[in-house]
Image (tube, rainbow, N blue to C red):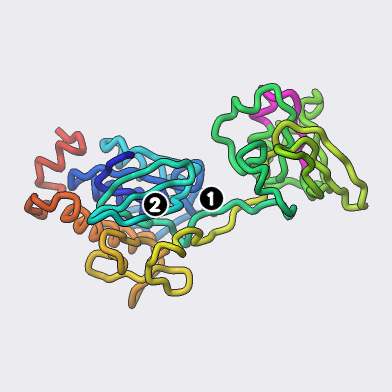
Amino acid sequence: MIKTDALIIGAGPVGLFAVFELGILGLNAHVVDNLDKAGGQCIELYPDKPIYDIPAVPECTGESLTKNLLKQIEPFKTSFHFNQRVNSVIKNKDHWIVETSDNIKFETPNVIIAGGVGSFEPRKPPIQGIEKFESKNLFYSVKNKNNFANQNVCIFGGGDSALDWAVELSKIAKKIYLVHRRDDFRAAQHTVDQMKEIAKTGKIEILTNFQPKNFLGTDVIEKVVIENNDKTIKEINVDSVLAFFGLKMELGPILNWGLNLDKKTIVVNTENFETNEKGIFAIGDICTYPGKLKLILCGFHEAALAAQECFRRARPDEKYVFRFTTSSSDIHKRLGVK
């Protein structure tokens, strides 16, 4: 059981700024995200798209904004838990017991939901009964590439993730089968060129105009059945399957946490952005209140006010004194400023 002052669900810009606001108050936080890296929507949906409404930053990209936010919280040595989601949140007196999909448990007085418009969930192959293969040899992300050493790996997809891993895993796998439903790829051109060069050696076999038809095997996938646009069927012997069909956004388990919902958003107050459950906060695009604007800068404001209440809950015996970062020696010390 990990004890922490706050657990933040979502590592997008608003979740990262919440780490900062908690940190300057002397509170530690752990962050859980369903993706394999920080950045949320900014990284997944528009890493190169210009953002113009961050105060004092005339223009930045989702990627540069994320990098700067991560740099800002470096002094706090925050623990991130990627590639997993929060499955359950259970009340225990004035604390919450939170469990993730990797069976990691946290005990905390504060849960901050900063999940954008929900968690990113993988789009799965349209094949019935594939759940029994998941986490055995069917995966939607790569946690440890060495698990695929000396294997025959079938990768589905034509975007950056599929091609990046085809190239990377070709260095250690026995063979990579890259299956895509079209001839053209949506990945960076240099990665496409690199993949095609490797294909000339036989380490990667490119199978375009094919889609998954069936997965055969009792406990694990042993054969992948794919179908060409002309209805030709092909079977591939595999050790593992990686499916990169993109992501969809869902509220997921949040639906079962007893929170007041308005469609796909969580209702909060505007004093501290707490939900109807004491100690559970919602900030960023996932929360709603009268006058709500879905802007990153609004999420930053919400994070700052939520952090104040988190302090009161995490340090009930300490008197809170508001301090400006420009003049507080305590804050300077936490930030490593001399």
Q: Which residue is mark 1?
A: 44
Q: Residue 89 lies in magenta, yes or no? A: no
- The one nearer the camera, 327 or 41, is 41
**What segment carries the magenta color?**
167-179
Q: Depth check: 206 or 59 in front? A: 206
Locate residue 222 relative to residue 134 in the image: left or right: right
The residue sitting at 35% across, 55% down in the picture is 90
Q: How would you rate the neighbour count of disc 1 (Cα within 10 Å): few for under 14, some for 14-19, many for 20 or more?
A: some
Going from the N terminus, do you reach mark 2 or mark 1 first?
2
Q: Position of residue 31 (x, y in %)?
A: 37, 45
Secondary structure beneath disc 1?
Answer: helix
Q: Amino acid at mark 2?
A: Ile
Q: Is residue 212 above or below residue 71?
A: below
Q: Where's residue 91, x and y in %?
A: 31, 57
Q: Residue at x 39, y 40 (%)?
A: 80
Asked if the residues shown at circle 2 and circle 1 are in contact, with their CB atoms under 8 angstroms apart, the answer is no
Q: How many marks?
A: 2
**Mark 2 = which residue?**
9
Q: Amino acid at mark 1?
A: Glu
The answer to if 172 sits in the magenta stretch is yes
Residue 36 lies, in percent from the top left, at 51, 41
Disc number placed over residue 90 in the picture, else none: none
What's the CA distance linking mark 2 and mark 1? 17 Å
Q: Quadrant of the C terminus?
A: top left
Q: Is residue 275 above or below residue 105?
A: below
Classify mark 2: residues with Cα within 10 Å, few (<14), some (14-19) or many (20+): many
Left or right position of 9 against 272: right
Q: Residue at x 38, y 55 (%)?
A: 89
Residue 203 quadrant: top right
Residue at disc 2, secondary structure: strand
The percent coordinates of residue 167 (x first, y second) are 67, 31
